[in-house]
Image (cartoon, rainbow, N blue to C red):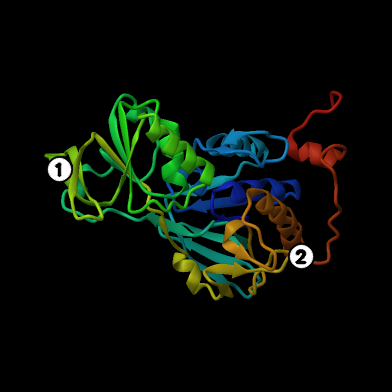
Amino acid sequence: MLQTDVVIVGAGPAGLFQVFELGLLDMRAHVVDSMPQIGGQCVELYPDKPIYDIPAIPVCSARELVDRLLEQIKPFSPQFHLGQQVTEVQPQPSGRFVVRTSAGTEFDAGAVIIAAGVGAFTPRQLQVPGVEAIEGKYLHYKVSDPQLFAGRDIVIAGGGDAALDWVLALYDKVNSLVLVHRSRDFRAASSNVRQMEQLCAEEKMQFLEGDLTGLDVDGDTLKSVLVRARSGVVNRIDTEHLLIFWGLHPKLGPITTWGLNLEKNQIEVDTAKFGTNIPGIFAVGDINVYPGKKKLILSAFHEGALAAFAIREYLKPGEKTYLQYTTTSPIMHKRLGVVVDGV
């Protein structure tokens, strides 16, 4: 059994910055995530989408943000356990917790921080014959490598931000692009919808209103997709790749069995410590809810800072924790491995 000050559930931006705030207060963490890579939903859903509201960084991609956070937490040597889900969190009489994962990893943890975003999720998938043969090769529910589509004929299905974002990112890199959506009512940013409509007017892409009803697959190769219009007419669109962005099915999974107070699949916390109804379990980021909650990365960073002080108090009750500034504190410099004036 691995012993640690804190187990963090979730390796997205909220969980990564939590490592930093804990480290400043001399606490170490193990981080568990059900995904096979670090970065959470940012990297899973929109790795190259620009983010503009991180303080002092005018613009960066989700992937760049995660890389910078990883660089920032290096001094605290967090240990990551990826591709496994936390299945059990058992409070002990000592106030500590036994934490178990789906991979059989066990922790003896002083506290637990849930930074799991909206929980584990799966994309809404196309349910027609032939899907299994091409999924991950010619049928995609996310974009890991945009270069895969360079010079190809592609169809993008969806009417939300993800679909329109990738339309605008790929239209000038592919041979042809057709956007398919069940109606002309989009859930995406209106500016992106206007840009898409302008591209259609300029014949740089096409929009087709209708429902995906079938695939033409030759072995394990996609040849075309079938789209049924409202009139009932079925159109055949030749394509090499199909990208589907129909949203996600978020699921809290085992978290719902841990005895936490939930409100619409979010964990209720206070705004002083971001603690839950179970002493020693905290929640930061999109997974939590409280009056005035805003689902912003910036908010998660603030929550992580206050949660770290609360956890320090929980682990060392009665011991005074002084607020020290990384700019001037020799203790902070030592923890960060910073050399100031040769010292």
Which residue is at the far left?
219
Return the x and y of residue 58 as percentages of the image width and height: 67, 33
Q: Residue at x 16, y 48 (%)?
A: 130
Three-letter amino acid code at the position of disc 1: Asp
| Left or right for 288, reference 135 | right
Q: Which residue is mark 1?
A: 216
Q: Nearer the viewer, residue 195 or 19?
A: 195
Q: Nearer the viewer, residue 194 or 304?
A: 194
Q: Residue at x 63, y 75 (%)?
A: 93
| Left or right for 225, reference 101 | left
| Left or right for 89, reference 210 | right
Q: Which residue is mark 2?
A: 272
| Left or right for 215, reference 103 | left
Question: In terms of secondary structure, where does tag 1 sit?
Answer: strand
Q: Nearer the viewer, residue 313 or 123?
A: 123
Crowd rating for badge 2 (residues with CA inside 10 Å; few <14, some 14–19, many 20+)? few
In the rendered view, tell whether residue 196 sits above or below residue 149: below
Q: CA distance from mark 2 to mark 1?
A: 57 Å
Crowd rating for badge 1 (residues with CA inside 10 Å; few <14, some 14–19, many 20+)? some
Return the x and y of residue 70 as percentages of the image width and height: 60, 38
State whether residue 46 appears in this view: no
Return the x and y of residue 18 as percentages of the image width and height: 65, 50
